[in-house]
Image (tube, rainbow, N blue to C red):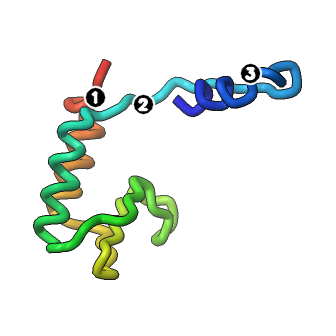
Amino acid sequence: CQAAAVREITKNNEEKILIVDFICHGVPSPNLFKEYIDYMQKKNRSKIVKYNNRSIIEGWKHLEELTFENGKVDYTSSFSEAWRNIFYSHNCLRP
């Protein structure tokens, strides 16, 4: 993930940086995530300009934040709860 990108960027200075690679939870299906984003944009009749999977606006709860082009910010929705349930159940993760 990010460690691979850091390795690529710093490949000429490898002796000057320590990279720690943690095990990733997993990556959801891009098609399923795209369907979710499309659904939320249609529901809100506005394009999403920012997506934050772990907003800390209310502390360290697992709260999703969607910012729309029309200025609306959505922190919770029934569909986003469904998305989180699918994500954390590991049913949409790619190998």
Which residue is disc 2 drawn over?
25
Q: CA distance from mark 3 to mark 2?
A: 26 Å
Which residue is disc 1 drawn over?
93
Query: Eyeballing the image, is 18 above or below 53?
Result: above
Q: Nearer the viewer, mark 3 or mark 1?
A: 3
Q: Nearer the viewer, mark 3 or mark 2?
A: 3
Query: Eyeballing the image, is 10 above or below 66?
Result: above
Residue 49 spot, x, y in % from top left: 36, 65
Between 41 and 52, the one lying in front of the other is: 41
Marks 1 & 2, CB-CB < 8 Å contact: yes
Question: The residue under label 3 is which amino acid type?
Answer: Lys
Residue 7 spot, x, y in % from top left: 68, 24
Which residue is disc 3 drawn over?
11
Report helix, strand or loop for mark 3. loop
Q: Which image quadrant for residue 19?
A: top right
Which comes sooner in the sequence, label 1 or label 2?
2
Residue at the image position 31 percent from the left and 18 percent from the top: 95
Residue at the image position 21 percent from the left and 46 percent from the top: 34
Between 10 and 79, the one lying in front of the other is: 10
Marks 3 & 2, CB-CB < 8 Å contact: no
Residue 4 spot, x, y in % from top left: 59, 24
For the residue carrying disc 1, how many other residues have a C-alpha within 10 Å: few (<14), some (14-19), or many (20+)?
some
Residue at the image position 18 percent from the left and 40 percent from the top: 32
